[in-house]
Amino acid sequence: MIGRASTGRSPLLAVYATLVFVFIYSPILVLIVYSFNRDGVGGFPPRNLTVDWYAQLFADGAIWDSVVNSLVVAAGAVALALTLGLLAALALDRAEFPGKGLFRRLVLLPLILPGIITGLSLLMFASLAKIPLSLATVLLGHGTALISVATTEIFAGLQKLDRAQEEASLDLGATPWQTFWRVTLPNLRLSLLAAGLLIFTLSMDEIAVTFFLIGRDNTLPLEIWGRLRRGITPEINAISTLIFAVSVLLIVVWYRIRTRSIGSEAQQLLENPLEVE
Amino acid sequence: MYSRSYKSLVSLPPLLWVGLFLFLPYALMFAHSLWIVRDGVLFHQWTFENYRKLFANPVYLEVLWRTVRIAASVTFCSILLSYPLAYYLSFHARARKELLYQLVIVPLWVSYLVRGYAWKTILGSDGVLNGFLRYLHITHAPVSFLLYSPFAVVLTLTHIYTPFVFLPVYASLEHIPRYLVEASQDLGAGPLATFRRVVLPLSLPGLLAGATFAFVLSLGDFLAPLLVGGSSSTMIANIVQSLFGAAYDWPLGAAISVCILLLVVALLFLTERLEKRWAFR
């Protein structure tokens, strides 16, 4: 249905939209180009292209240690936030308990509050409970703050889930435990995957909460942050370019998974129209 | 259909976890704001002294006012950039719509730090922009006010939050039934009148959600001022951060945090009510 409303031409608007895209992408482009610039992060035009900064980056032990730390924290945060987020979403969807409204708001709070508030609150908690700051406190902070993301994604998935399937499973003699593993969870796999990917990305990039919970070992963003305060070389452009490339790769992977699973559902519908729904 | 034990099994662990690791820490923030530090030692003594100090000192109020101004500018600029973009995508982009949509989303996944750093290398006195201007012989001496100014903070945060504002605005524009727009045109309204009286009012809830997000997150930002802002654009969260660091006055820092928290919660409450009132029925 293409009405007149969607066919109007407006060259001015198209130019404006193009300019906004230029604004959004030019800093990223500059970053990438100057990662190959021998003469430093500024100046114009970039000349004497080189891959030396990448060579220097690959030989930089501290950066790769921090990458490993970030991966460990992100993996832990994904596990923690997904587990608790799944339970929280099920609780919000299916259980009644006093303070449910408060619970929902509280879970979502870290998503909308500036990170510094959540970070400092957890710092005060750690200090009062005499928990020494380390990667474990960072993991705990990320995992807890990102329950919000897991809960929102999985709750949306639960809303689309057909409860008749679960009822059928229970009626046919499956235990609630079997029903959960064989019916509920497989139906939520796309939401779980989406939430996991998002939590992973957010944790890899997190600074505001990490800033206050970090011990001796740095995560990647804090390692970069520390170097920014000391004077900068295109080595930082090089690592930023790699981060950008990995982010884009993750998005592509995510879209492939999503379109494939939508595709397989459509296929199933065509083959056995009576079995779906 | 779910048994009692199922219900308590799914609700108890997250309730306990969130109670212990979110509710308690946030409550501790309030408690700290009512305690006091004397000679570098924390006393668990209940007092409103920190809040009195806060409101008696014009420096804090001045920084808070600057922070609100910066956050408001960021919100305004993000809307200015993302609303027309979302409108273009929703109403004019046709076949390229999906691709362009993805192109706006990609930067959302790109590190905050990476984008902040990119602006630092562009705006510096020997940065890319100054090099470019000199190369074109537009300027001869480096323009130094670009970096380390409130302008740089607003620019960087606008770059970061424009896609955030775009998302809900685009979603609300996509939800507008096209027959309403056509009806308005059939009844003789010009494009501008149709926009002002049909499209804009129906997209207000999305606009509000995006604007709230940009405002709240800029309000509590302390990284952009450190990265590109310099001392002339110290924001309220920088004060909090220094009180928790070198200045060692956690209670005073907590009192400022509580003020930020209350401001944010009040704003969320307000926008939630407005969104309900403006929602399309």
Image (cartoon, rainbow, N blue to C red):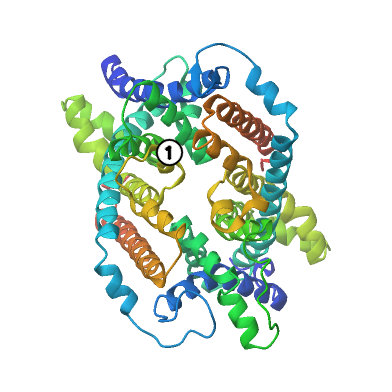
Q: Quadrant of residue B258?
A: top right
> Disc 1 designates what residue?
A212
Identify the residue at image location x=26%, y=16%.
B5
- Please, is residue A57 above or below residue A46 in the view? above
B88 lies left or right of B114:
right
Estimate the x, y position of residue A246 in percent, counting from the top left.
33, 64
**Figure disc tally:** 1
Residue B222 in view here: yes
Identify the residue at image location x=49%, y=67%.
B103
**Quick one: SS at disc 1?**
helix
Chain letter behind tag 1: A
The disc labelled 1 sits on which kind of residue? Phe
Estimate the x, y position of residue A58 in percent, counting from the top left.
25, 69
Residue situated furthest top in the rendering: B45
- Please, is residue B36 above or below residue B104 in the view? above
- Please, is residue B73 above or below residue B67 in the view? below
Image quarter in which the C terminus of chain A is found: top left
Identify the residue at image location x=44%, y=21%.
B24
Estimate the x, y position of residue B116 in percent, counting from the top left.
52, 60
Image quarter in which the N terminus of chain A is found: bottom right
A152 lies left or right of B265:
left
